[in-house]
Image (cartoon, rainbow, N blue to C red):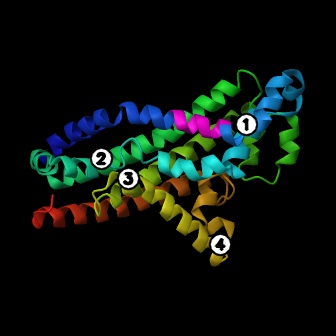
Amino acid sequence: MAAKTFPRTVIADIKRALRFPILIAILVVILSFILDNYGDLLVAFENPERAKEVISVFYYYFNAVSFGGMFTRYLFVLIAAVPFGAQYARERQSGMTVFLIHRSGQRNYCISKMLTAALTGGLALCLGSLIFVAGLSTRLQLIVPLNLTEFVWLPYCSLLSSGGGVPYFAAALYLMFLTGALWASVAMCVSAFTSDPYVVIASPFLISFLQMQFSRLLKLPDTARLELLLCGRAQWGSDSVSLFLIGLVIALIWVGLTFIFYCRVKRRVQDGLC
């Protein structure tokens, strides 16, 4: 019976997630790219012919994501949680949790919540990034020859020199999806400990900030810093191996967070707190 209800539970959660908040999240992602590159974008649009020779879509994407733009760095971890990260907290406030758990089962309910949060969080960041890249590519090239010499030190640089840069952006969007999935899952896990949706949505920002500060304090190498791996400034081994291993690490973190979320929800049900 549980196996039969799980697909219906997931579909119902995805329908709840694919509403107005995810559209807002996608728009904020696009706006973050624009604000991080505002000055350079003005230059490019004022002198488009000159810009086409020396500036590429890659330049703007790298400047915002990998080099560390202010808006993309601090807003993306928050935006990932907006579509669905606080759904459990909202359901607790509305008193619907017990009914939904009774209808689908505790395990189905918890896995569905975590899976939907990861999918929609990753989708929001990935789609927003894709729209920005696609829109800018109508005016500029994905890469220019200058990029191949200036960024030869960059992880995944070999992907820039093949397929006109398309393989690099495919890898970048994959990493962006993993970033959104990670922080949306963190938010959903936190929602099992507090019923305030605003605290839940803000929690990935605080946790990511502390994680970065501890990494700097401990002077961890770049290859041991998750935020650098996810933004494409570090890699493990070859391009394909690195992308696979990073995906595997995020999947394992998701499993751990799901286990914590499930145990906490189960305890709350037993204590009559849901």
Q: Position of residue 78 (x, y in %)?
A: 48, 50
Residue 240 visible here? no
Q: Amino acid at mark 2?
A: Gln
- Mark carried by residue 216: 4
Q: Circle 2 sits in a helix, a strand or a loop, which is it?
A: helix
Residue placed at 58% from the left, 40% from the top? 173
Give how far apart the Cα atoms at labels 1 and 2 are. 34 Å
- Which segment is the magenta one? 27-34
Residue placed at 84% from the left, 26% from the top? 52
Give how far apart the Cα atoms at labels 4 and 2 are. 33 Å
Give how far apart the Cα atoms at labels 1 and 4 are. 29 Å
Residue that carries the numbered disc 1 in the rendered image = 38
Q: Quadrant of the N terminus?
A: top left
Earlier residue among tags 4 and 2: 2
Q: Position of residue 145 (x, y in %)?
A: 87, 35
Our reading of the magenta stretch's main secondary structure is helix
Q: Amino acid at mark 3?
A: Tyr
Earlier residue among tags 1 and 3: 1
Earlier residue among tags 1 and 4: 1
Is 54 a magenta residue?
Answer: no
Q: Position of residue 20 (x, y in %)?
A: 38, 31
Q: In this rendered view, identify the residue nearer to me: 126 or 155.
A: 126
Residue that carries the numbered disc 2 in the rendered image = 87
Residue that carries the numbered disc 3 in the rendered image = 198
Residue 152 visible here? yes
